Image (cartoon, rainbow, N blue to C red):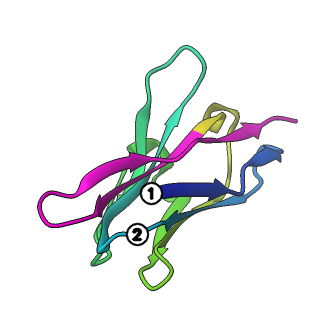
Amino acid sequence: QVQLVESGGGLVQPGGSLRLSCAASGSFFSVNAMGWYRQAPGKQRELVETITRGGRTNYADSVKGRFTISRDNLKNTVYLQMNSLKPEDTAVYYCNAFILVRGGTPVEYWGQGTQVTVSS
């Protein structure tokens, strides 16, 4: 069974930093695109940043210059380095990945979510 396991959330003051990690585990052939989404209370889930297996990234304008996504293909892990955090970054952050479990089309998986709270 394939799982995405997240870690690294928590409480941080405005201007601070956090690093999120998400590792894919289980039996599969390969992990294709990976990324992070977030959902604040009363709002829809939104894209934060994604990265292809080859390293091409896509990000929301709201995090440009502050957040950096990276991945380790050998560890099937994606990271999100978050700097200069603002109160409006407060949300549950979800890991997302398209995983080729068997021949055919990659399947989309979601992590359980990790809370990030930015507050003084």
Q: Residue furthest right?
A: 120
Packing grade of label 1 (10 A; few <14, some 14-19, many >=20) is few
| Residue 35 counted in the magenta span | no
- Magenta stretch, main secondary structure, is strand
Disc marking residue 120: none
Relative depth, front residue between 64 and 105: 105
| Residue 70 visible to the viewer | yes
Q: Quadrant of the N terminus?
A: bottom left
- Residue lying at 14% horizontally and 57% vertically, measured from the top left: 105
Residue with the most extreme bottom position? 74
Q: Read off the residue under disc 2.
A: 27
Judging depth in this view, the residue of 96 and 36 nearest the camera is 96
Query: Is residue 51 at least partly visible in the picture?
Result: no
Q: Residue at x 51, y 56 (%)?
A: 4
**Hey, what amino acid is under mark 2?**
Ser
Name the residue at 73% across, 58% down. 17
Which x, y percent locates residue 21? 61, 63
64 horizontally vs 104: left or right? right
Farthest residue, direction top: 42
Residue range corresponding to the magenta coloring? 93-120
Asked if residue 95 lies in the magenta stretch, the reply is yes
Residue at mark 1: 1
Mark 1–mark 2 contact, CB under 8 Å?
A: yes
